[in-house]
């Protein structure tokens, strides 16, 4: 892939539900670091995220926003239509997880 970063882009039907179910399992792998950030955008707007060593990306609803790799450790989130979705990024050797709540207003 571009700049040697292997990124798998896949869609989760309900990202929040999937995370909740995963954490309920006793033998589910634990993540060293996880936190949520809110990214508020207007429809048609974009926001750049810099995450070092991204290895995996999950987007809850690709009709609300799209995510593109734009360079080394740089992703662009583009707002497509009003609504909310969840973006989850895994990075680094410990697969640290960062959760973004993407809020798009008309």
Image (cartoon, helix red, strand yellow):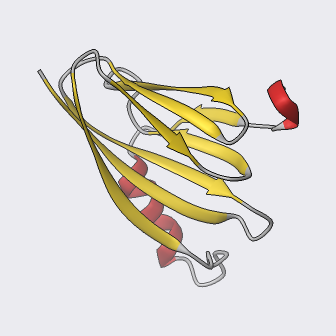
Q: In the figure, is residue 28 to the left or right of 40?
A: right
Q: Position of residue 66 (x, y in %)?
A: 45, 23
Q: Quadrant of the N terminus?
A: top right
* x then y, percent, for residue 5: 81, 38
- Which quadrant of the figure has residue 79? top left
Residue sitting at x 39%, y 51%: 100
- Position of 97 relative to 11 (above/below): below
Residue farthest toward the bottom in the current orientation of the protein:
26
Give the residue at x 73% y 37%: 72
In the displayed structure, 6 sits above or below 80; it is below
- Residue 28 pos. (x, y %): 63, 75
Relative to the observer, which residue lies in front, 103 or 51?
Answer: 51
Position of residue 71 relative to residue 32, above or below, is above
Residue drawn where x is 43% and y is 69% of the image: 35
As drawn, the residue found furthest toward the right would be 4
Residue 26: x, y in percent?
A: 59, 84
Q: Quadrant for residue 43, please give it.
A: top left
Q: 68 and 50: which one is in front? A: 50
- Outermost residue toward the left in this view: 106
In screen coordinates, is 82 left or right of 39? left
Task: Decide if residue 81 is on the left or right side of residue 78.
Answer: left
Query: Which quarter shows the C terminus?
Result: top left
């Amino acid at each position: 892939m571009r700049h040697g970063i292997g990124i798998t882009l896949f869609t989760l039907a309900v990202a929040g539900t999937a995370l909740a179910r995963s954490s309920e399992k006793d033998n589910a792998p634990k993540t060293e670091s996880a936190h949520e950030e809110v990214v508020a955008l207007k429809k048609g707007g974009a926001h750049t995220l810099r995450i070092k060593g991204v290895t995996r990306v999950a987007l809850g609803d690709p009709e609300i926003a799209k995510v593109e790799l734009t360079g080394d450790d740089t992703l662009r989130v583009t707002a497509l239509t009003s609504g909310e979705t969840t973006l989850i990024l895994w990075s680094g050797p410990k697969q640290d997880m960062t959760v973004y709540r993407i809020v798009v207003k008309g």
